[in-house]
Amino acid sequence: MLFIHNFLYRTSLLVLLVALLFSCKKTEEYAKEVNDYPYLITGEIQLESIGKGLYKGLQRSYLVGDTLTLVGKFFVDKPGTQIRVGSQTIQPLEKYLLPHGINSYTKQTEYLDVLRFVITKEMGLGAHIPLSIIANGQTLQAPDISIRQFSGSMHRTDTTLYVEQLVNWKPNNADFYRNNGLPMINNYSVTADGAIYFGNQTEIDVCKGGKIINLINAGDKFQENGLLFSIKMIAGNVVAYDESTLTFSAEVTEDVPEAATSYIFRLCKMDLATRKVTTLNRTLVTKGPVTVNENGGPFEGAVGNLKIVATVLKTDVNGAVYFVNNYSTAGTDHVNEFNWYKKGLGPSSYLGQSSVYSNLCRVDVGGTVKSLFKQEDLWIGPSPYNIPGFSLQMTFDYVISPDGKWAFCNNQINLSMQYSFASYDLEHDEIQTITGFFSQPYHFFSYDTSAVTGIHEPALFVYFGLANTNYLSNFLYTPDGDLLVINGNSIAAVDLANKTTYCYAGTEMGLLGGVPSQDKITGPAKDIYFSEPGTRMIGQDKQGSLFYTGQLDGYANGVNFYRLYSRK
């Protein structure tokens, strides 16, 4: 009996020992499996040991150009590791190892991977962009993220808006502009990060970080394919929204035989990282006269095959460039030796000259030009050329929406010199809406309950007028499709399709011009006099900050640049 008891005891002990050993093996295999599996930290963690402070967890909403940080175990030292955002496999901008305690399996210091990379539009735009991590043979699906080009609008008055002056600028040759009655700036644009590129007939500059940096001057020489050309007069410029390239148009001088009988224009693109210049189009304008009239056209096609003198350059976030083509044909009844561009007078100086195309064009990223609008002058009638596009009575005052889907242009002028504008759907080649002459009532949304500064009426008359000092527009499309209009002393946001409006900045009563306290140039937006003579809106950065200038022909004091931004 004792033998049986001992046998059963020893057998049970052996079974328990085998089970224990098997269990330990399973536990070890499980621990190894866990140790070999990737993971992502979505909550807060300190990164002070690598000099990065507090990581506040995986953010879910990003703008193009933002930096996304991932913290976790991604086995970046092993082959096959991939981080995918949308359809893009990304390469980290920076990567670090973060000490994170002792690994319970290896008994050694555990390190987390910290990866940082830049959000691009190629990853996709929208609210549900997938984020996945492929590491050590496993796929980890992270929470979806949203990617947008711009910060969204409140669609109501933001009471925290504030204006700061960025810089004052005055060209060294201000007397040239004073003596010829010209604005000191005739083209400007802004990047996603708020850098302002601007220029005139003799230079192109950038305002960045509170400083002015000179880029191009009349007299600068460039070499391309072994040929040298020099800038004589700058006709226009625009910067890509991502600040990768600068497109500029200029009259140039070249040591070639045709320079004796023709003006030479180039439309160029500069790589801003390398300063390398590539010519998109080179056009000869005959000085004249000639014995046979030159036929107009072609007006569309490959950019390098057309005759182009590009002015009033603008762009959209997709990289398309818009311009007014002011090429002038050679004829027996006129000569181009009056040099309509010599002093850079701009498109308004040759209104009524039938030899000038004056059509508003778009060149896409593939280099194909489309004629969007043609000019039919009030006094001389239709253009003699069969130019494609909608008819406008003035092409030089136009606004393009950031996404390139909409254009706001002067539609008609009546005999009283009042203006009618229209918004055009560029995707479907149709008119969206036409404004009335001079002003038009819009349904008004009031968000100010004050009896002093609020408008408590159902309608507001919005004034659509042209810039009074030069051909730059005093309108601006927001990324959400509203049109910003300086109205009275404030800025109105107008929904053209639904005929509604609200006060974007300033005070509601300021839209009627009647608030005495609204007389400042910096400070809270409710105190700003936005109708300072010559005020022109430049554009918005990805955060929604609005950049604008003060008077462009204040030759004694120069030009002020301002930023209107939210303090939320």
Image (cartoon, rainbow, N blue to C red):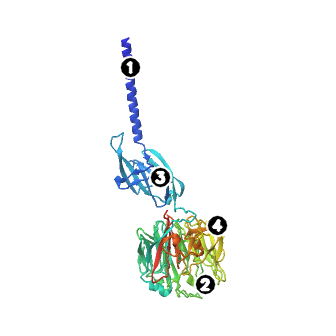
Above or below, comparing residue 404 to residue 116 in the picture = below
The residue indicated by pointer 4 is 497
Q: Residue furthest left?
A: 108
**Which structural element holds mark 1?**
helix
Q: Position of residue 465 (x, y in %)?
A: 60, 77
Seen from the viewer's position, the closer of residues 507 and 95 is: 507
Seen from the viewer's position, the closer of residues 218 and 289 is: 218
Q: CA distance from mark 1 to mark 4?
A: 88 Å
Task: Give amino acid for label 4.
Answer: Ala
Seen from the viewer's position, the closer of residues 68 and 507 is: 507
First in residue order: circle 3 vs circle 2: 3
Q: CA distance from mark 1 to mark 3?
A: 56 Å
Front label number (1 vs 3): 1
Quadrant of the image occupied by residue 445: bottom right
Q: Is residue 281 visible?
A: no
Q: Is residue 4 visible?
A: yes
| Residue at image coords 48%, 59% | 120
First in residue order: circle 2 vs circle 1: 1
Above or below, comparing residue 177 to residue 504 in the picture = below
Seen from the viewer's position, the closer of residues 269 and 349 is: 349
**Which structural element holds mark 2?**
loop
Task: Give amino acid for label 3.
Answer: Arg
The residue indicated by pointer 3 is 84
Q: Position of residue 358 (x, y in %)?
A: 58, 78
Task: Give amino acid for label 2.
Answer: Gly
